[in-house]
Amino acid sequence: MKKRLAISMFVILFVAAAMGGATMAWFSDQVTVEPNVFTAGTVELDAFDSWESDDFSVDTWNPGDCTPKFIDISYIGNKRAFMRMQITGEWDDEELDGDNVSWKTYVGESDYGDLYDGDTGEWNIPDGYDDLSAWFNDDSEWEALVWDDGIGSHDFSDEWVYYDGWWYYAQGSDSDTTITKGEGEDAITINAIDPDVDDVEGINIIGAVCLDGAGTGNEYQGKLYTINANFEAIQASHAGEWVWDEVIEQNH
């Protein structure tokens, strides 16, 4: 009898313990880390150009005409980068000689903003000139520029330096990130653009494209001359070899 009672008490205690365990709770905690959002850096260019002039139409280019050409280029990316440009031109007829087309770049003292209104596309001829032709023929205001062999004005070359078919932007301030093109006396060293320091928006290039009167005969009537302005930028950390497979490119 005592043995049965002892067994019964054991069973009761076991069941009570089991029931008690079923009602017990425990401490816990949970925390959520805020999502991490990473924004990729950008290498981005913006550019526009204008041929607008009251004295000129692209559909009626005449021998002896000099045509104003305005280019505005901006680097608007947030990564350090290098930038370069290349200007080429050709007639649509391969048999025609392109030497009758020449470029001039502005070297006068007027501010670019005083010469050209980007909002209206109007050119403001400085006082003392009757028309665009008289202005363009003043060597103190305009200087010959040959895009493909680096001949240019001192003012123009201050901002851009030439090497092997390309003009490289030379006003970057990041002297810790540089590239060197060429060797010896012909070598050029270029600092990268640092977007946190350098204001590389609204770089203005004012030029004129001239069609030589004496060198342009009847064979040029109705022919088309195309100018290609190509601007490229590449991330500074990947420009050591200047491999432009993934270059950001703007054609105008």
Image (spheres, grey):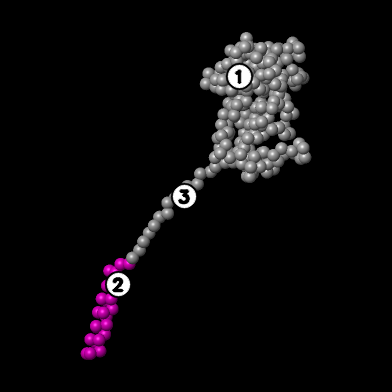
Furthest residue to the top?
130
Residue at 69% across, 43% down: 241
The amino acid beneath tag 2 is Gly
- Tell me the SS state at disc 1: loop
Task: Tell me where residue 92 appears, x and y as whole percent.
Answer: 71, 20
Residue identifier under label 1: 51
The residue at the point 56 percent across, 22 percent down is 113
Q: Which residue sits at x=68%, y=18%? A: 140
Distance from disc 1 to disc 3, alpha carbons, whole Å, reads 48 Å
- Report the quarter where the N terminus lies: bottom left
- Residue 155 locus on image (x, y percent): 66, 27
Q: In the rendered image, which residue does mark 2 sit on?
A: 21
Q: CA distance from mark 2 to mark 3?
A: 42 Å
Assess whether residue 8 is covered by the magenta stretch. Answer: yes
**Res 190 quadrant in image:** top right
Looking at the image, is 217 positioned above or below residue 82? Answer: above
| Secondary structure type for disc 2 | helix
In the image, which is nearer the foreground, mark 1 or mark 2? 1
Three-letter amino acid code at the position of disc 1: Trp
Image coordinates for residue 107, horizontal then vertical, percent:
66, 22
- Please indicate whether residue 9 sits to the left or right of residue 157 in the image: left
Magenta region includes residue 142 = no
Say if 96 sits above or below 148 in the image: above
The residue wearing badge 3 is 36
Q: Along the polypeptide, which appears first: circle 1 or circle 3?
A: 3
Which of disc 2 and disc 1 is earlier in sequence? 2
Dot 2 or dot 3, earlier in sequence:
2
Q: Secondary structure at mark 3?
A: loop
Give coordinates of residue 139: x percent, y percent.
70, 18
Q: Which callout, 1 or 3, points to the residue nearer the camera?
A: 1
**Considering depth in this image, is 222 or 195 the residue closer to the camera?**
195
